[in-house]
Image (cartoon, rainbow, N blue to C red):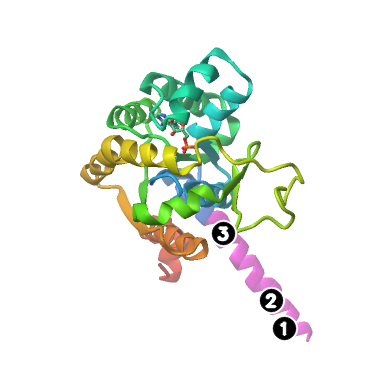
Amino acid sequence: MGYLDDEVKRLQGILDSIEARVKTLEESQFGGSKPKTAKEIRMILIGPPGAGKGTQAPKIKEKFSCCHLATGDMLRSQVAKKTPLGREAKKIMDQGGLVSDDIVIGMIKEELENNPECKGGFILDGFPRTVPQAASLDAMLRERNQTLQHAVELQIDDSLLVARITGRLVHPASGRSYHSLFNPPKKAMTDDVTGEPLVQRSDDNAEALKKRLATYHQQTAPVVGYYQNTGIWKAIDASQEPGQVWKSLLAIFDGDQKKASSAGGGILSKLTHRS
Ligand code: AMP
């Protein structure tokens, strides 16, 4: 037993010194910080209303401890506070149109610069919705020497969205969403987490949805082409149930991790010949 204990201690000593040496090497190679892994995320979710952006985005936020910026939620908070911007936006939102590019670009810029949660990266939900918004986002990131990693399109046929939207219930403060039939809260009209009341959005009706879908196909579908050109577009079948959609997202993140480790993330994996 004594021999075994001594041997374990000796091996532990060797491991400690290898770890210390690897740390020094990584610091000299990566400028004092660990190599970037898929831990920091900068991505957007594109998809028509009801595709599941608001269901998946909080899960991404939780996984990466990043910020979740939903321009629709930000605008609704202005509406609730009855600010001049909120009053103006409400009319446009209820008609299923788009608020001006300058306003939403300003909102995102402000959050990316000042929201401490965004230090760990971001997931944008409902932005960019036009090609000029996409170009502005790229310019904002260029100024920060950053790039977008993923533009994920949640693809789903319009015909499936009416039932999803007309039964949708939301918790305004968090953006959490439920469905009266497909994903009901534990207690009727009550948020599972806070116990606060759920509401139905004033634009979640069949008539406004028609206009929102038309707006989506006219103005947001070209955003897909924009990211196909930049090479970061990926598509997921959003007609699947939410758990399956999440698995598809995890597969995209998994691809990141593999890339990071084969790109030298690194020294330890080279030593152990593991990728
Ligand atoms: P959402 O919650 O993402 O469905 O957004 C609700 C409404 O807010 C939309 O129908 C638009 O009127 C407005 N809105 C949200 N995001 C944007 C955006 N990026 N650009 C313009 N309007 C937006």
Query: What is the spatial separation of the Cα atoms under label 2 and label 3, in whole angstroms?
Result: 16 Å
Query: What is the spatial separation of the Cα atoms under label 3 and label 1, in whole angstroms?
Result: 22 Å
Q: Which mark is residue 19?
A: 3
Q: Residue at x 57, y 23 (%)?
A: 79
> Residue 122, image x and y in percent?
49, 39
Q: Residue at x 49, y 60 (%)?
A: 246
**Secondary element at image label 2:** helix
> Residue 38, image x and y in percent?
45, 52
**Contact check, label 1 and label 2, Cβ < 8 Å:** yes
Who comes first in sequence, dot 2 or dot 3? 2
Left or right: 160 in relation to 226: right
Residue type highlighted by circle 1: Leu
Instruction: Verify whether residue 216 appears in magenta.
Output: no
Q: Which residues are magenta?
A: 1-21
Query: What is the spatial separation of the Cα atoms under label 1 and label 2, in whole angstroms?
Result: 6 Å
Q: Is residue 57 visible?
A: yes
Most frequent secondary structure within the magenta stretch: helix
Left or right: 122 in relation to 173: left
Nearer to me, 271 or 196: 196
Left or right: 56 in relation to 1: left
Who comes first in sequence, dot 3 or dot 1? 1
**Secondary element at image label 3:** helix
Q: Which mark is residue 104?
A: none
Image vertical order of residue 27 relative to residue 140, above or below: below
Q: Is residue 155 visible?
A: no
- Which residue is denoted by mark 2 in the rendering? 8
> Residue 107, image x and y in percent?
48, 23
Q: Which mark is residue 4?
A: 1
Residue type highlighted by circle 3: Glu
**Secondary element at image label 1:** helix
Outermost residue toward the left in this view: 229
